[in-house]
Amino acid sequence: MIFNQAKINAFRLWGLLLTMLGMGLMVLGTAGIVFWGHAGKVFAAIGLVIGLISMMGSLGIYFWAGMLSTSALQLECPECHKLTKMLGKTDRCMFCRTILTLDPNQANITPEELQAAQQGQGTQATPHHH
């Protein structure tokens, strides 16, 4: 993940960013009517349509993250001892961002070693270690 966080939280972050983008475009589009009067209606229509598309994308991402969350493996973080969810072979704790894995081959390697191993397999994942 970009910010070294749990995968489910990263999906929720993208959903939130799309929501904020959509609302911002809708507000700016509507402001076009205030600034340019009748001529700003075209600007408003474009802003509202693109904002609506962004909001619908956000809805889809939030729904997808919710579905992933229901099927995610729940486990106790070895560092903070809070119940967290894990997607895939490696993930991060939602609370303390400790790197978690169920794969014994990746349990005690450094982030650089894991990244090299994943790039060797052709995946584009960020490094995770335990």
Image: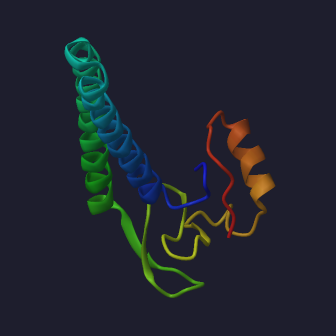
Give above or below for 100 relative to 14: below
Q: Nearer the viewer, residue 18 or 124?
A: 18
Q: Which residue is pictured at 61% across the width and 72% down the height?
A: 98
- Which sits in the foreground, 107 or 92? 92
Q: Nearer the viewer, residue 78 or 40?
A: 40
The residue drawn where x is 26% and y is 40% is 60
User: Residue at horizontal 62%, vertical 37%?
Assistant: 123
Residue 86 is left or right of residue 57, and the answer is right
- Please provide percent x and percent y for residue 73: 38, 67
Q: Residue furthest bottom?
A: 81
Across the whole image, how many numbered discs are drawn on residues?
Answer: 0
Q: Is residue 34 left or right of residue 117?
A: left
Where residue 57 sits in the image (x, y, percent)? 29, 35
The quarter holding residue 121 reads top right
Q: Is residue 43 above or below residue 20?
A: above
- Against 65, is 101 above or below? below
Residue 58 at x, y percent in the picture:
30, 41
Where is residue 107 drawn, in percent x and y?
A: 67, 68
